[in-house]
Image (cartoon, coloured by chain):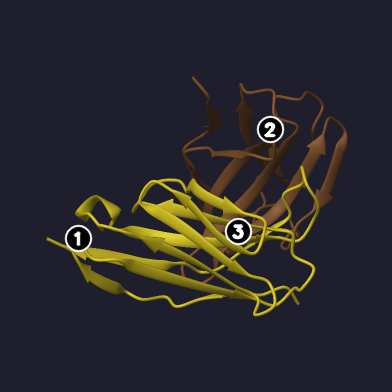
Chain colours: A yellow, B brown
């Protein structure tokens, strides 16, 4: 059973703070990892992907991967009210170019002005 | 503009009446997939396709069919819909660029109600 676990939240942070979103997964053979943002009533939007252990930074977002601990996280620096959304973690169980994804149930983030 | 389109966006139907939800992408992506999203269950993959005429089951394929006769289109077929297929459905297309960058786009969603 390939499982992806996220804290459902809601996670509330003040504007300007760092939001930390966490995700654990069960399949040790997982190849790549994705974070999506989904605003209420909208479709998911890919914001970060990571394949290798360590950190990957893109603007205010940092994805962190620890395959030994089967743990992936997303940090959002200088959080803005526009970051308020549900964040979905997804794990790819297949190789490059294929997208057999298992999603977590999402963490709802609220950034308080 | 990169786009994944789905039709219809909203559909109310009755049990047993065959329906098709269309999905089309304009990015020449090889990989397409269908998901359903339900409260408390999250997004679950129904079927995926790695290229024309290549499809495979995701985590929740029961009650659904797909076909991939053209690269741009990936319709989802419900031969005999049941109320437990009431859900929000998303189509997605994906591609890994040279250098290992993943691109992925979701369609706007189709809200299906089966009475």
Q: Is residue A56 left or right of residue B33?
A: left
Is the C-beta separation of discs 1 and 3 under 8 Å? no
Chain letter of mark 3 equals: B
Residue A64 appears at what percent x and percent y?
53, 64
Depth check, front residue: A66 or B97:
A66
Q: Which residue is mark 1?
A: A16
Image point 54% across, 29% down: which residue? B5
Q: Which residue is mark 3?
A: B85
Q: Nearer the viewer, residue B26 or B38?
A: B26
Label 1 is found on which chain of the structure?
A
Cα distance in 3D space between marks 1 and 3:
41 Å
The total number of labels drawn is 3
Mark toward the viewer: 1 or 3: 1
Q: Quadrant of residue A68?
A: bottom right
Alpha carbon of mark 3 to alpha carbon of mark 2: how far? 34 Å
Residue furthest left as drawn: A113
Q: Residue at x 83, y 49 (%)?
A: B56
Q: Is residue B114 in view? A: no
Answer whether residue B103 is visible to the viewer in this image.
yes
Residue B83 x, y percent position in the rendering: 57, 62
- Determine whether the residue tagged by mark 2 lies in a helix, strand or loop: loop
Q: Is residue B6 left or right of residue B54?
A: left
Location of mark 2 (residue): B97
| Res A109 quadrant in image | bottom left
The lab-note entry on whether marks 3 and 2 share a chain reads yes
């Amino acid at each position: 059973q390939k499982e992806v676990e996220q804290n459902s939240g809601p996670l509330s942070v003040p504007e300007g703070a760092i939001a930390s979103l966490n995700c654990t997964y069960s399949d040790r053979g997982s190849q790549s990892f994705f974070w999506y943002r989904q605003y209420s009533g909208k479709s998911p939007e890919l914001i970060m992907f990571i394949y290798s252990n360590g950190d990957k930074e893109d603007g205010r977002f940092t994805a962190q991967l620890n395959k030994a601990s089967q743990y992936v996280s997303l940090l959002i620096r200088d959080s803005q009210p526009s970051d308020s959304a549900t964040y979905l973690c997804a794990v790819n169980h297949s190789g490059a170019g294929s997208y057999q994804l298992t999603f977590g149930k999402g963490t709802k983030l609220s950034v308080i002005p | 503009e990169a786009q994944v389109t789905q039709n219809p966006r909203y559909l109310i139907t009755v049990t047993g009446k065959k329906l098709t939800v269309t999905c089309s992408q304009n990015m020449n992506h090889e990989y397409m997939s269908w998901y359903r999203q339900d409260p408390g269950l999250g997004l679950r993959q129904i079927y995926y396709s790695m290229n024309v005429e290549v499809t495979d089951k995701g985590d929740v394929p029961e009650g659904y069919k797909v076909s991939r006769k053209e690269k741009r289109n990936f319709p989802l077929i419900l031969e005999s819909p049941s109320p437990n297929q009431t859900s929000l459905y998303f189509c997605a297309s994906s591609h890994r660029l040279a250098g290992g960058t993943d691109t992925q786009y979701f369609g706007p969603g189709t809200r299906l109600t089966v009475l």
